[in-house]
Image (cartoon, rainbow, N blue to C red):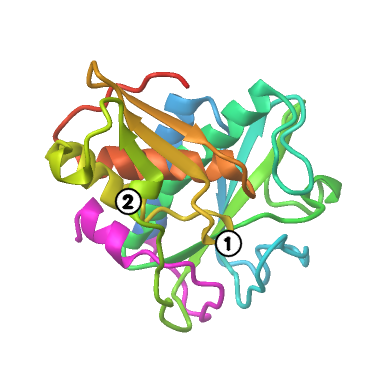
Amino acid sequence: MMNLLEAIDARHAIRAYTDEPVAADTLAALQSDIDACNAESGLHIQMASGLDDAFLGLKTHYGRFKGVHNAIALIGRASGTGDAEGTPVSPAAAALQERVGYYGERLVLRAVQSGLATSWAVLDGAETVPAADAWWTLDDGESVVWVIAFGHGARPGGRRRSKPIEELASVADGTGVDAWPDWFVHGMEAAMAAPTSLSQQPFHFTLNADGSVTAEALDGLFAHVGLGCAKYHFEVGAAPHKVEWRAA
């Protein structure tokens, strides 16, 4: 099995899938990872597989999907998750979106390690699906924040693009990239490969004088979800260095 850095390099947003079923042992491993993520995060992540249409006929906020038979619903509780363009309506909603991004991307990379294709998506109108028709279960106050499609990709991923590292990161003393610690550079290289809506990369990482790192969401579509994805990638890239996060 590929390691996490290899999975970061191999991950692409794939929106078309074949009808080939996902192996039972792969699904079992994913479910084990979901259980671990739920225990750590307090989220209510759920998975479905082998459906005719895992998106239940709902439109996606961005991008067209085909043949989605398997999906992971990233579910949590907060008072208002965001407006139509993904801007959180409260600090609690921002924290929920970041947590969804962090743990959702952890599951994405596990799926990629197993040889599967994946893509993030927002399902418009998920909250209107009758309980009898939905494959997920919502407790009081919960909502489907994002979903992850997964399966065997029908086509390869496209070319990944990124802003320069100097636009996405800085150090408190103002030194240039050549003087940055290796672990910080490697963390940023991994963060630069994280999925964000429309590849906007609306985040900035700062290495503070005490060695801690501050990661901030900037203006952009679903920026806090993208920040959570980028923070998980950063930790993978910076390893074995243990990242100490400082709140913005």
Element at badge 1?
A: helix
* Three-letter amino acid code of the residue under disc 2: Ile
Task: Please name the predominant secondary structure of the magenta segment in the image.
Answer: loop
Disc 2 crowd rating (10 Å Cα; few below 14, some 14-19, many 20+) is some
Numbered range of the magenta stretch? 1-24
SS state under label 2: helix
* Residue 2 magenta: yes
Kindly indicate the quadrant of the structure image that contains residue 116: bottom left
Q: Which mark is residue 10?
A: none
Residue wearing tag 2:
165
Residue at (64, 73) in percent of width and height: 65
In the image, which disc is placed on residue 198? 1
The spot of residue 51 in percent (x, y) is: 63, 67
Q: Quadrant of the N terminus?
A: bottom left
Residue drawn where x is 31% and y is 57% of the image: 8
Task: Specify whether 141 is left or right of 151.
Answer: right
